[in-house]
Amino acid sequence: MATGRGRSMSELIAAGQRSISFEFFPPRDEAGAEQLWRAISDLEPYQPTFVSVTYGAGGSTRDTTINLTGRIAAETSLTPVAHLTCVGHTRAEIEGILDAYAAAGVHHLMALRGDPQEGPNAAWTPTEGGLDHAIDLVELARDRGDFRIGVAAFPEGHPSAASLDADADVLVAKARAGAEFAVTQMFFRAQDYVDLVDRVRARGVDLPILPGIMPILNVRALQRQGELMGAAVPQEIVDRITRHDDPAGVRAEGIAISAELCEELLAAGAPGLHFFTLNRSKATLEIFERLRISA
């Protein structure tokens, strides 16, 4: 059975030598669903601390996310963490979604402000009658039910943050409001993660911060994604990948770079690794092979 609501994620993370977790997104069709469940089947033997399921912009995948996390809770040994954003919802609608998660047996939540429906670089405008910040969602979920709450962290700073210090202040405020762990946005330099942790610790908060790992398979796609998320792809990574002119060489180099980042993070004291799987298991398993992580 999946882990119950009683233990906090910080306790779950602290219980093992390292935390391994995976992120999935709701499939768009039956073929996507089959691919997703193959990935879940491939990765379940690694006994991840949790698996998270994303939530489409403006609630576009709300019902699918609720159903998927509920099925994971009911049919696997995995602990599902359901994403929820403030985008496009009134407070009353969010309360209903929280109640639906609880009814589905999902008691771990990733509380996010979310990106504007026009895209992550658009100006943020709260929904009328809705919530304005992730901290508002943390407080609502904390008071609404027996939820264990995670939040986002940004090693290079949130794109709208005035400074890295201001960004750290926001993360600390979310922790003090009830968040029990954080997962970072993708990044490529271990030092950026270390500096983020140091900023949070300097503010007296011992929040577990899991680094989010995006397997590097295609540099152009990665650069586009990085631009949207405010995560710069270092030139040395671009140079290492583009010296290969064949897809197999590009992939192998990208996996090697991803594994090296994981090694640096674990050596620096990261409590674990969170993989953005893109609903596939192959790249994550290739990284595991390099890290000598076995099921």
Image (cartoon, rainbow, N blue to C red):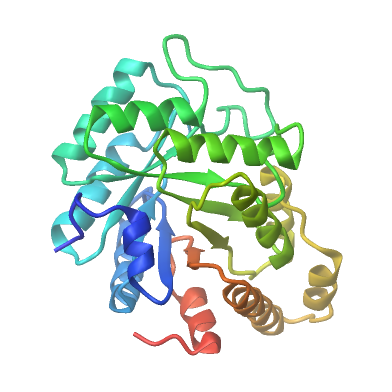
Is residue 145 positioned above or below 295 on the image? Answer: above
From the top left corner, tell me how far across and down residue 69 is, in percent: 26, 50
From the top left corner, tell me how far across and down residue 195 is, in percent: 71, 57
105 to the left or right of 216: left
Q: Quadrant of residue 107?
A: top left
Residue nearest the observer in this picture, 267 or 280: 267
Q: Quadrant of residue 222?
A: bottom right
Instruction: For the N terminus, give its image quadrant.
Output: bottom left
Instruction: For the C terminus, give its image quadrant.
Output: bottom left
Q: Residue at x 71, y 51 (%)?
A: 231
From the top left corner, tell me how far across and down residue 40 is, in percent: 32, 67
Q: Residue at x 45, y 19 (%)?
A: 131
| One can see residue 101 in this view | yes
Is residue 166 positioned above or below 19 on the image? Answer: above
From the top left corner, tell me how far across and down residue 184 is, in percent: 56, 53
95 to the left or right of 19: left
Residue nearest the observer in this picture, 266 or 254: 266
| One can see residue 36 in this view | no
Is residue 75 positioned above or below 293 on the image? Answer: above
